[in-house]
Image (cartoon, rainbow, N blue to C red):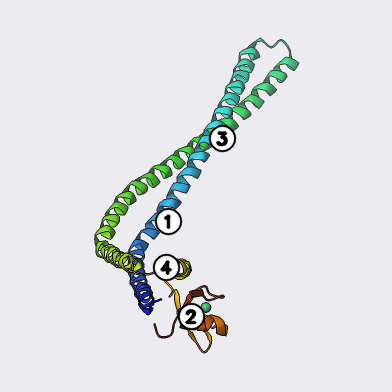
Amino acid sequence: MSIAAFSHLKEIQSLDNMIKKHLDAIAAEEGRLEHINALRKRAQDEIENLTNSVSQKKVTTQNLEKELFDWENKLAKAEENLPYATNEKEVSALERDRSLSQENVDDLQEKILTLLEEIEEHENLIKGKEVFLSGSQETLDEINLEIEIETRQERQQITNYEARIEVLRQEVPGSLWQTFSEARKKHRFNLPLARILNKSCEKCRFIVDAQTASRVEAATGYELCTQCGRLLIPLES
Ligand SMILES: [Zn+2]
């Protein structure tokens, strides 16, 4: 096994670190969207709640309107019959009906009026939030375009580094690449390679047994650190 293969892996490790810097720069740009997206999400949730509340209130209003209709009929009937009452008892019964009906009519009318006002208020709130949503969508589109332009260079750099990694990968023997890939899957942006220093993994300090260490140093076998899973590389590579 040639030591050169390990230097390719070391180059890939530094290219990955460069890629990470560019990814971080892109993420920082995209962070500008977070606040707007959070506000939009809140507005959407509020619209949903208000819409539900409006439809509940409309159902309640309809039911109250039916009740009101019944009481208005009762009231009319009592008033209609009053002149035809033949005795004191009938008069007072009809007057009781009339006054109870009137109370209910007044009460229901007030309740319905309150509901209608609340519905209107909610509908206005919904409209306001919808205006915010469409305005902030435009802002989002503008920012997205800015981010697209500002991160173009970053993305281009990443593509270049990835192309270079691909070239290097082809220079690395398959079995070494496979073992390296396991370490890289876990630690791609956090240094997947480790030397053995003071008989331990230089990154996590886990003790490497003598046999493993000598296989690594002689480059006769590929070993991952038992604890952190990084690929152990010869000191001289
Ligand atoms: Zn380790």
Query: Is 14 placed above or below 102 here?
Result: below
Q: Which mark is residue 151?
A: none
- Dot 4 surroundings within 10 Å: few (below 14), some, or many (20 or more)? some
Q: Measured from the top left, where is residue 232 in percent x and y? A: 48, 78
Of the pair 220 and 188, the residue shown nearer to us: 220
Q: Measured from the top left, where is residue 182 in percent x and y? A: 48, 67
Pointer 3 residue: 111
Amino acid type for the residue under numbered disc 3: Lys
Q: Earlier in the sequence, mark 4 or mark 2?
A: 4
Q: CA distance from mark 4 to mark 3?
A: 76 Å
Amino acid type for the residue under numbered disc 1: Ala
* Pointer 2 with pointer 3, Cβ within 8 A: no
Q: Which mark is residue 177?
A: 4
Q: Is mark 3 within 8 Å of ligand 1?
A: no
Foreground tag (1 vs 2) = 2
- Give left or right: position of 38 versus 85: left
* SS label for mark 1: helix
Q: CA distance from mark 1 to mark 2?
A: 51 Å
Q: Measured from the top left, where is residue 228 in percent x and y? A: 53, 74
Q: Is residue 208 visible?
A: no
Amino acid type for the residue under numbered disc 2: Val
Amino acid type for the residue under numbered disc 4: Trp
Pointer 2 residue: 216
At 55% across and 26% down in the image, what residue appears? 65
Task: Name the residue furthest right.
Answer: 89
- Dot 2 surroundings within 10 Å: few (below 14), some, or many (20 or more)? many
Of the pair 82 and 63, the residue shown nearer to us: 63
Q: CA distance from mark 1 to mark 4?
A: 42 Å
